[in-house]
Image (tube, grey):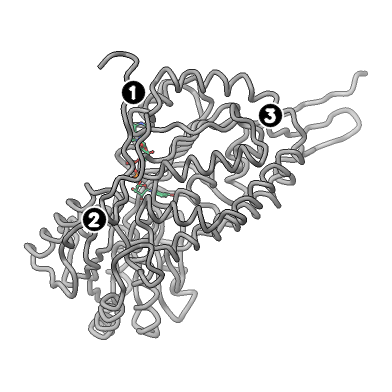
Amino acid sequence: MTKRQKVTLKIINPANGELLKEMPEDSPADIAKEAQAARKAQPGWASKPISERIAILQKFRELVVLKGEALALTLTDEVGKPITQSRNEIRGLLARLDFFLQNTASELAEETVFSDQGMTEKIQHEPLGLVANISAWNYPYFVGSNVFVPALLAGNAVLYKPSEFATLTGLHIADLLYEAGVPEEIFHPIVGGGAAGAALLEQDIDGVFFTGSNSTGKKVAEAVSRRMIKIQLELGGKDPAYVCDDVDIHHAAVSLADGAFYNTGQSCCSVERIYVHSKIHEPFLEAFTAEVKGYPVGNPRDEKTYIGAITRPAQLETLQRQADDALAQGAKLHCGGKRMPGPGFFFEPTAFSNVNHKMELMREESFGPIIGIQEVSGDEEAVALMKDTVYGLTAGVYAKDQARAERLLARVDAGSAYWNCCDRVSPRLPWSGRKGSGAGTVLSHYGIKAFTKPKAWHLKQPV
Ligand code: NAD
């Protein structure tokens, strides 16, 4: 290949295998040029009053409302997400935007923390400068906006690399931001896969905000490890839930099936392991399986579809391997268990019981419509199993008694704890992974300040 030839990115609809679009990937030289332009433009953006940046992002919100249905359709075609769930994601984006639009100015206002006749101490929140936002495809509007919205509001320039599986959505976001008034040098999308992400990390950036898998997260951390720049990693999980003996069984089963299978199980906080008290194990399994068997699978554009396509075809192998390994080790299959015939990439909604932690299904992230349900003797065994993981994103307990649930969840090292709910993210609460699920925090007031560096002012009056 000559220096001038570019790699072509093929964008495929995972629900039918059809080519949606082809486009050239950004080369390292393109990315270097964008980084230099962004670096040059950033001080001008930061010097605007924050009210101007808020007004621009408010306009972006209006455009998202105006074009919401077209955005949802692109998302559905590009990642295979059922259309009703794509619309939910757009609605969720609006709620995140509202949180940031309402809270950023007060959160970043200068704070005087001490003052007497001779001395004043104040804190100023300065933007980091130029940040890289490397993103996943499964909730591109959520995981992207958690970063680029507060980053832009705080006065940063952003080089945004959407996943190669959500490129069209990433380009829509850029177009809407430009239409709203964000200068092109201040927010720039980088088209491409891992090589483009790696080239982005070589630029003179002040921070990297990454959402993706644990294995890529490690590569990102290694790539910037010798530079003193801010790094945040939002990674995968193996999120557990424990169902106590005193719950409304039907309600818990329906809620947990939704938590495990919504977005076709392709959520960082999907329920990935369920532990059920032996007193209710059998009726819970029955209710859970009945619910899952009722999920319509198929064309993501169909309003009735609940289980859509598997976005990354390679994930089908992981799902099949986990299902086969569980069966070989004695798991009991209640429904599903295999890839569906094409066209497109689909996996049957799959539920196993009689599972244990020797099985990959109960240890490694599945990221698809598959779940293991394990019977436990009581609270102590459930907590021990919930803790038996390299990940730490979320954990849940279904129980009548809040104190019991809080006592158990306090012992699990996870960034989010759920009582009688699951697979839930709130813009008002910090979102963070522990252990193999990452480092750093988005959303809430933590996720606003994350895009700034504090300057401590010590101001002494002259004598
Ligand atoms: P991935 O790790 O394959 O890719 C993520 C991003 O990294 C993509 O944009 C990709 O192009 C880029 N990339 C790949 N190699 C790179 C390299 N060497 N240097 C720099 N960038 C590189 O993950 P994915 O399949 O896009 O997303 C699924 C994963 O993301 C799951 O593990 C899921 O749990 C996780 N996730 C976590 C959260 C969270 O908030 N914790 C949210 C959504 C998804």
Question: Where ligand 1 lies, by image quadrant?
Answer: top left
Q: CA distance from mark 1 to mark 2?
A: 28 Å
Q: Nearer the viewer, residue 400 or 50?
A: 50
How packed mark 1 is, by other alpha carbons closer than 10 Å (few <14, some 14-19, many 20 or more), is few
Mark 2, Cα crowd under 10 Å, few <14 / some 14-19 / many 20+, is many
Residue 195 higher or lower than 100, as above or below: above
How far apart are the two marked residues, 3 and 1, measured between alpha carbons? Answer: 32 Å
Of residue 16 and residue 186, the one placed in the foreground of this image is: 16
Relative horizontal placement of residue 346, taking residue 134 as reference (left or right): left
Circle 2: element type: loop
311 shown above or below 250: above
Looking at the rendered structure, the kind of residue marked 3 is Trp
Residue that label 2 marks:
345
Residue 202 locus on image (x, y percent)? 42, 21
What residue would you read off at disc 1? Answer: 6
Name the element at disc 3: helix
Discs 1/2, front: 1
Q: Is residue 56 left or right of residue 394?
A: right
Q: Determine which residue is flagged by label 3.
A: 45
> Does the residue tagged 2 have its C-beta within 8 Å of any atom of ligand 1?
no
Type of amino acid at the residue the image marks with label 1:
Lys
